[in-house]
Image: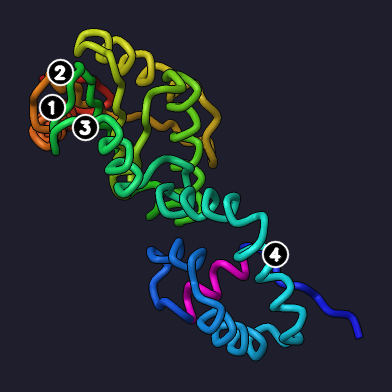
Amino acid sequence: MIVHLPTLKQLQYLVALRRFGHFGRAADACFVTQSTLSAGLRELETLLGVTLVAILAAARQYVLGRDNERLIERLDVLVHTDPLTGALNRQGLREVLMKRLHVAGRVDEEMAVVFMDIDHFKQVNDRHGHDAGDEVLRRFAGVIRNVVRSSDKLVRWGGEEFLLLCSDTTREHAATMAEKLRGALPAQPWPHGLRVTSSFGVTSLKPEEDIGAAIKRADGALYVAKANGRNRVEVA
């Protein structure tokens, strides 16, 4: 009999789904007790159609064994990263800010905040389908990452909106960078021969300022950019 062992991804997903009911708590699977693990493995045996011995061996190796630390790291990436674009999600943004905050909601250095929105993105989905829209999102995030510094944090805020946090960056320097990003987008190859542009709202988070206020200000500048014809950078 040939036994096909489950992959690490299958184990972490199924253990989290069956025993915890919410993938956001998947990291808890790294610290389950032996009795809880055994109960989960009995359910996995039915789901995967393999022997309990094989499942237990794989689970011990990946969950309770030497690879536990790597599993935690991979789960951490899943929890904090948007799976489509590779950008941080909002939980990832909170994690980044927590590392920078000395007082809740405040930082001790100047930081630029750039809000960006892909222009007329709904038309891409309506005319070419969601697969094309997903590919535009992936390539858009790739263009941004290729231009900004490795220390800058790209966040998928929601839908076609992205947020960029640039530490030790003035508002003026961030506006220059946003113009560079704006100019780079139309030159990229896009699916179906599309011409993709973006609008940008730029501001800076001053020392001792609440992060929410800066994000709201950047969002307001983005709204002005869209109202003024899109494919432009506005500073607040």
- Mark 2 is surrounded, within 10 Å at the Cα level, by few (under 14), some (14 to 19) or many (20 or more) other residues, namely many
Mark closest to the chain's N terminus, 4 or 2:
4
Checking the image for residue 61, the label placed there is 4
The one nearer the camera, 175 or 46, is 46
* Viewer-side residue, 138 vs 93: 93
Check disc 4 and give the amino acid type. Gln
Q: Residue at x 67, y 55 (%)?
A: 66
Mark 4 Cα shell of 10 Å, populated few (<14), some (14-19), many (≥20) = some
The CA span between labels 1 and 4 is 51 Å
Q: Main secondary structure of the magenta part?
A: helix
- Side of 54 where 65 appears, left or right: left
Alpha carbon distance from label 3 to label 1? 25 Å
| C-alpha distance separating marks 2 and 3 | 25 Å
Residue 165 appears left or right of 85: left
Quadrant assignment, res 154: top left
| Secondary structure type for disc 3 | loop
| Residue 227 in view in this figure | no
Residue 113: x percent and y percent? Answer: 22, 25
User: Quick one: SS at disc 4?
Assistant: helix
Q: Say which of marks 3 and 1 sits in front.
A: 3
Q: Is residue 133 above or below residue 233?
A: below
The question of residue 89 being in magenta is answered with no
Q: Secondary structure at mark 1?
A: helix
Q: Give the residue at mark 2.
A: 235
Give the residue at x 39% y 66%: 25
Amino acid identity at mark 1: Ala
Q: How many marks?
A: 4
Q: CA distance from mark 4 to mark 3?
A: 37 Å
Q: Which residues are magenta?
A: 10-18
Q: Which mark is residue 101?
A: 3
User: In this figure, which residue is indicated by the disc labeled 1?
Assistant: 221
Which residue in the rendered view is the most extreme toward the front? 34
